[in-house]
Amino acid sequence: MKSTLFKLSLSLAGAMLLASGTVAYAKNPMVGGAAMYPTKDIVDNAVNSKDHTTLVAAVQAAGLVETLKGPGPFTVFAPTNAAFVKLPAGTVETLVKPENKAALTNILTYHVVPGRLTAADIEKQAKASNGMAHLTTVQGEMLMVSKEKGDWYLTDAKGGKSKITIPNVMQSNGVIHVVDTVLMP
């Protein structure tokens, strides 16, 4: 019980600091039931998240594991399993087939931006650009990031929106922002 209350207190404190414009980083934030360690790389943390098993399988199928274990730094907008469920039935199963590796890689690299962009960095870019940050992905296309009703949303090339649900999960080679919808180039 104390552990749960402590985690809730940390989460609430972090949310209040983020809302006030001051960015705080939990030492080892919980994502998908697992602590995320800033000393581990993106892949080594992601494999422990119960909420990211589909993403991890897709990264493996696309052959991107070694890239995301590399020095980076990378900013990854990491869709949860629930985000993948929102896709039309059979989409994930089709994309992870070897013959669709190029299409899968295209989608996954659309979720990655070069550099380590924290929520504060994104907010600063958005403020400098009339409220909308323009981020060029590793895939080569643009993502737009804006604040709506107190939450940060990414808008993809097709006009789809994805909410950042957990920002600033620091990694040894970048940062992860958990998102609730798969982005489409």
Image (cartoon, grey):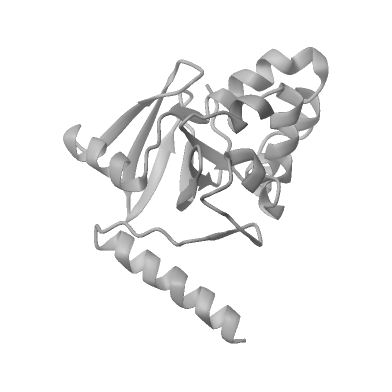
| 75 versus 135 height, above or below | below
- Image side of residue 109 versus residue 50, left or right: left
Residue 179: percent from left, percent from top = 52, 45
Residue 162: percent from left, percent from top = 49, 41
Give the farthest residue toward the bottom. 1
Q: Which is more toward the observer, 92 or 158?
A: 92
Query: What quarter of the picture does the N terminus occupy?
Result: bottom right
- Image side of residue 98 versus residue 127, left or right: right
| 116 versus 185 height, above or below | below
Q: Which is more toward the observer, 78 or 30?
A: 30
Question: Quarter of the image holding residue 88?
Answer: top right
| 4 versus 96 height, above or below | below
Task: Give me the residue at 35% from left, 60% from top.
Answer: 24
Q: Which is more toward the observer, 145 or 52?
A: 52
Task: Give me the residue at 71% from left, 54% from top.
Answer: 50
Residue 89: percent from left, percent from top = 76, 35
Task: Give me the residue at 70% from left, 38% from top.
Answer: 56
Q: Which is more toward the observer, 43 or 96?
A: 43
Task: Give me the residue at 36% from left, 37% from top.
Answer: 145
Q: How many marks?
A: 0
Residue 150: percent from left, percent from top = 32, 56
- Image side of residue 149 versus residue 35, left or right: left
Question: Quarter of the image holding residue 42?
Answer: top right
